[in-house]
Amino acid sequence: MKKTTIFFLNLGFFLISFSVYHIAFFYKYADLAGLNLKDIIPALLTGLRFDLSTSAYILIPFSALIFIPYISWKDAYMKILFLCNLCWLILVDIYLFVDLQYYPFASRHLSFELFNTTGDILSMVKTGWLEYAPQVLFLFLFLTGISFAYLLLSKRLLKKFSYSGYSLVRKIISESAAFLVVLTLSAVMARGGIQMKPITLSDSANFSSQFLQHLALNGVYTTLRTFYSMRENMEMKGWKKRYCSQKEALQNGQAMIISPEKEEVPDQAYPLQRHFKYGEKDFKPLNVVIIIMESWSGKYVGALGGVVDATPFFSRISGKGVLFRNFFSNGQRSIEAISAIITSVPPSGGMVLSRSGAFAQMPVKFLPTLLKEKSYKTFFIHGAKRGSMGFDGLLKQTGIDTYISKEDIMKQGGRDDGIWGIYDEDAFLFADRLFEKQKGPFLAVIFSLSSHTPYKLPSERFRYYKPEVPNYGFLNVLRYSDYALSRFFDEAAKKEYFNNTIFIIVGDHTEGESTRNNLYEKFSVPGLLYSPSHLKPMVITKAVTQVDLMPTILDVLRSSDDYASFGKSAFSSKPGIGLLSYGDSDVFVKDGRMVASSMNNVEETYNYLLPSKNELPENEEKLVDLKREKGCYLQLFHDLIMTNKFYRPNKL
């Protein structure tokens, strides 16, 4: 078990470094007038969880190398390992120091910057010495002190570390026991505790101020998280490539998104932070209910010209609302859809709020927060088990206060499907009863469940389509979820809140197996604004995406508050555009044309206005123009994220 002592020695020194970092961060950036002890202590305790998780990951190489059979029993080998670990500790301390100095410039910890500055390291070192000489001197003294202490303690530990006199069996037993202890502790620390879900960036969102959220984090963790995102979601990958100049990206990007006749940009340093030209007294405090339907595909919606109308109720009320004839999901997963709808940021490159190292630290006011400032209550209702799909972490960051899950609905008689959670009918009727009790305005997001594979129905009476119908299993649950929607509106129409509510019904993404024929099918989902008392029926044919919903809602409410969005109101005069996440590619949509291009320039094109004749490959001029516009949109997106210019940070 001697090697557990070695593990704890290394862990202790990393935790000392992180503790000094948090103390320095607090000393440099805390506004003591706005903080109290009961807020600071939980932030530091959460910070300890992040530090333990970070330490577990960065100690993986050393922890593995100390257990190599036979070789690791030699003193000379262990001395080399201790020296290597000391170098690793020094590098981590330097990185924390850089993060500490970087923070006030971007109001966030380091994330992707490490991967975009490899060619500028020498210049950065020179600048650091010239600008931060006193701080660099302190760093030098700290590194000298911690290195001396580490070498002294490791030397003493090595003197006690010996397997002389041990039999081979005893050595193996001792090593195995120590390995199991270190492996177990590392796994628990890496997860940030023994809770169901591993710790994520969203766990820092439990505090009342941005400063406390950032106090709990450290730059090594946020960088590791970004690196993971790069591997899994291609986040930030290739951002050094410029599609067009910064000036051109700004001009063209703003021209595609901002509507000068409806909006004003108060500060061009934050080119997408703007407000509608309404007066404060123009605001209409209508309830907002966003109903997100699982796997609803435009291909099977009659109102959208579907090959089968598996949603007869939706098709019927579509004629009484604002129907988006060409509405697109911004991604192909539920978490991407919900992030896009609530944040109004496309999930391109892994920009999902609860998972992105850069995005999660941005001081943005999302739709729930904006409406809470208008005294709205905020709800999220989903029939799955609490924490399913990581929604709990996402919701903490968006400003939604009340999360209602399977456990809550079952207390009021909700029926469990035995697989995912509560049947849609019961979840929707629960929502109706909740809304009826509200005394003031509210924002609610309802996410359906029943149209998810493996397509479980509550009874045989809902088995409408027979096996000879292609995709009959999915079509049956789609029709059932449409029935559940009709039950909700039948009840809601009887209640007082109904006439004071804007309902938004959208699909989260398409059903993958049956929508593979072209780009349009892969992303076409239903989209409808429904409020008979406040909206005149119409059909909007230009492209609208989930990212456009927030500005559209604020436009309908006649809000004059500042907001930031990569989308625009569906009621603006601007042509419809969209950036859709497509694996490690992006699909750009404009004027009926869609073009997908990956890092390797592999292209797929489609013209949904002329589906019988896909003209894009034959019209090189239009294709070049479309790719150029996509490049400028992407470049603006990249530049604003990299420079933290999407939304004005709070002053430190």
Image (tube, rainbow, N blue to C red):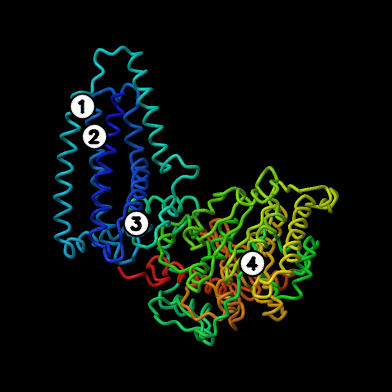
Nearer the observer, 355 or 193: 193
Label 2, secondary structure: give it: helix
The residue pinned by badge 4 equals 328
The residue pinned by badge 1 equals 158
**Horizontally, is 623 left or right of 651 in the view?**
right
Residue 469: percent from left, percent from top: 84, 52
Q: Earlier in the sequence, mark 3 or mark 4?
A: 3
Q: Amino acid at mark 4?
A: Phe
- Quadrant of image for the N terminus: top left
Q: Quadrant of residue 309?
A: bottom right
The residue pinned by badge 3 equals 39
What's the CA distance linking mark 4 and mark 1? 63 Å
**Horizontally, is 58 left or right of 144 in the view?**
right
Q: Nearer the viewer, mark 2 or mark 3?
A: 3
Do the residues under discs 2 and 1 have CB atoms within 8 angstroms? yes
Q: Earlier in the sequence, mark 4 or mark 1?
A: 1
Q: Residue at x 32, y 35 (%)?
A: 62
Q: Residue at x 47, y 84 (%)?
A: 264
The residue pinned by badge 2 equals 82
Q: Nearer the viewer, mark 3 or mark 4?
A: 3
